[in-house]
Amino acid sequence: MSPTRRIVYAAVATALAGGAFFACRTAPATTLVGNDAAIKVYVPPGSYDEFYSFMSGGFSGQVSVYGLPSGRLLKVIPVFSQNPENGYGYSEETKAMLQTTFGPVPWDDSHHPEMSMTDGVPDGRWLFINANNTPRVARIDLTRFETDEILQIPNAAGGHASPFTTPDSKYIVSATRFSVPIPNRDVPIDSYKQNFRGTLSFITADQPGKMDIAFQILMPGYNYDLGHAGKGPSDGWFFFTSYNSEEANTKLEENASKNDKDYVAAVNYRKAEECVAAGKAKTFPSEYDHNYVDPSSGIAKVETMHSVKLLNPMDCDGVVYYLPTPKSPHGVDIDPTGEYIVAGGKLATVIPVHSFTKLKKAIADKAFEKVVDGIPVLKYEAVIAGEVQKPGLGPLHTEFDGKGYAYTSMFISSEVVKWKLGTWEVVDRIPTYYSIGHLMIPGGDSKKPWGKYLVAMNKITKDRYLPTGPEMFQSAQLIDISGDKMKLLLDFPTIGEPHYAQAIPASLIRDKQLKFRNLAQNGNPDVTRSESDGGITRKGKRVDVRMIAIRSHFAPDNIEGVQLGDTVYFHVTNIEQDWDILHGFAILGANTSELILQPGETRTLQWIPTRVGIYPFYCTDFCSALHQEMQGYLRVSPAGSTVALTANVSKKAQQQLSEPAKAR
Amino acid sequence: MSRASRVLLLLASALLALMLAAPLWRIQLIAPQYPEGLGMKISANTVRGQREHDLDNINELNHYIGMKRIEPESIPELHIIPYAIAALAAAAVLVALIGRRELLSVWLGAFATVAVIGLIDFWHWEYDYGHHLDLEHAIIKVPGMSYQPPLIGSKQLLNFTAVSVPDVGGVLAGVAFLLGVAALVLAYRSEPRPVADWSEPQ
């Protein structure tokens, strides 16, 4: 080959090499799924999951229940949002659950499920969850997976730091994410520093149907973000994070990120109890609703309360201390021993861990940096136990495995970081997909974690599942934490936007499940106990239809004499007494939802006909071979029509119609 | 100058012309929550996102650390670079037509100078964006941290791995330069003595 040619070839080869350069791409992230992942998450047909996991439904306002380790969705429990799927919040029996002093609020943003506890260990009696938008807390009964009680929180906006539970479930709490004027009134927004305050509410929770606000503590106008109760040595204390110690009222993104440290509020709630008992709290006029299901009738009732006990820390020495904590702390989590208080500073470059022993000593030594509105600020150096160095970016929440390790979610660097309590060294890290918010270990915030699995609840889904348009389910990952190294086991989509979650061994809940309601104990005043008991009555413009549902018919099923201008109430009782035989009820043109009727249960649908004609109704829950035959007709006549009020089938109905004086 | 030299030079000129249409450099930002990728491409006359809204999204992210917005209109060099490249391409054609190897040397020297100045200027802008942060308004402030992406190679900037590499245009420039060097080598090999006329021995 001539030298000329050689050089020309070399030049061409260079050009080709340049092209090849572009073929190089970033190598895909190595897969972290172990070979045995499939076996570890496989629950054979007919077998059960090891754990129930309760995840907040986020902006769905509900609670979702997943089995672990399979990641199977078992149920969505309606809580703060109307649920047309079963009529919750639509039926006459459940409407009151969503009542507030603002009127009916049919939606909310549910954030943090918390299990009831006995001696600091989840006991599977109840699940509590908060509503963030219109501050409320709810109790869910775990023998029925139903919401039984909702309490509104007055003098509050943004019930975010809620409903964390004391080790004995005596109290759950709710602290204000948004400070507001207390009492709320018409003031200029830029009078924030002067007029806006936060509150920490302690709610008695250990008596079903009797949740109430024991007392509220009036706090400086910061944003109270999350909380956790102390336990063991720190039992009797509650810890809340706060940010916006700058007290900014605009552009918080920037203006509330200026201070190097904000605060964890350490609240001695036993001290607060003493002060309240000693009459140091003001009786403060405050309207709020307490909604609960009356256990005998099954009907939700609203009770409006008129005042709370409001305690100012100035009037109760030693009730609250502030622990300086770096950079807008989010989560505050107490380790199983109750000694360490871990805070996740959203913008911090370390994870600070405070010591309860040092906290007590700092209080005794009066190691105060300053006093804010009667609240002593302890010196950082006097309370800090250690800092986890270089943990990652954006620490948010920490859970514990009960074996001496802590696991912190890192939003910005999208990972879970495992570190050792006491030495504060990072021992392992695993990526999450993508941008993890909360994380959960069964019992991971209690005295006795079941440290086998960790669930990462992520804020961003992107490419994890088959795409479903711009809106997708959220993404969760199940991680095996039984060994030294964390191992990714499973990816599963979750509804709404799960914030926190709780999980406990299935055995603590499974065997207590109600299979159907006892018809004999149905105390609904409009119950129909047998086929012959159904009926129809008129009182002015109100028509009440009482009917039964049983495979495969309604009785009565032909109804006449309803007139335009009437309001009709269908009181439907499912008189089945068999496991999982549910019926539904829906009628043409109804402006509400259907009803779903559990065996032995009565539910009422309000219906206002808008035009004359014939209206079919039918069973919506496939109940039997002749489910399609389970239907009926209602005739609507013009106002003033002479069509007689009749409901066939029922002898009692005929009897009632012949004795109009006895009609309701 | 041999015909081979002239052809290589014309080829180099063509590549330089193509450079105007192709991005010169790209900076990719790799982070777990961007599985689809995020990056920007720097062309002779503008800066664009790797995909349609990437530049806006990068600017959005940068506001957390107080970096000023990357706005192509505010970078005056982007008005000059296209002319510099066009001039080099035109000069290459002229040198090929004239066929004097001294001119070829001068052209190569000019090319190298433009390239070096360009790279220094690029580095300078990266330094400026990465260091001159608005700490008054920055939300994430990591003591001692600056956010200058590398000129070439990769660097961890908080949760992003920033990878900076020549793009098509940059590689075309490199190849054009090498073609120029090859043309020069050939010119000196095939013609030990300079010739005054245009005729060439067969």
Image (cartoon, helix red, strand yellow):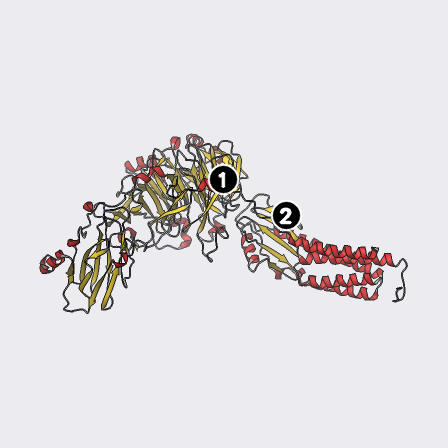
Q: Residues within 10 Å of mark 2 (few under 14, many from 20)?
A: some
Q: Position of residue A79 (x, y in %)?
A: 33, 49
The N terminus of chain A appears in which quarter of the rendering?
Answer: bottom right
Residue under pointer 1: A36
Residue under pointer 2: B154
Q: Is residue A361 left or right of residue B186?
A: left
User: Mark 2 is on which residue type?
Assistant: Ser
Q: Is residue A263 visible?
A: no
The CA span between labels 2 and 1 is 35 Å
Q: Is residue A624 left or right of residue A328?
A: left
Q: Position of residue A323 (x, y in %)?
A: 44, 38
> What residue do we see at 45% from left, 40% from top?
A40
Total marks drawn? Answer: 2
Q: Position of residue A404 (x, y in %)?
A: 46, 32
Q: Is residue A483 visible?
A: yes
Are callouts 2 and 1 both on one chain? Answer: no
Q: Is residue A166 left or right of residue A533?
A: right
Q: Secondary structure at mark 1?
A: loop
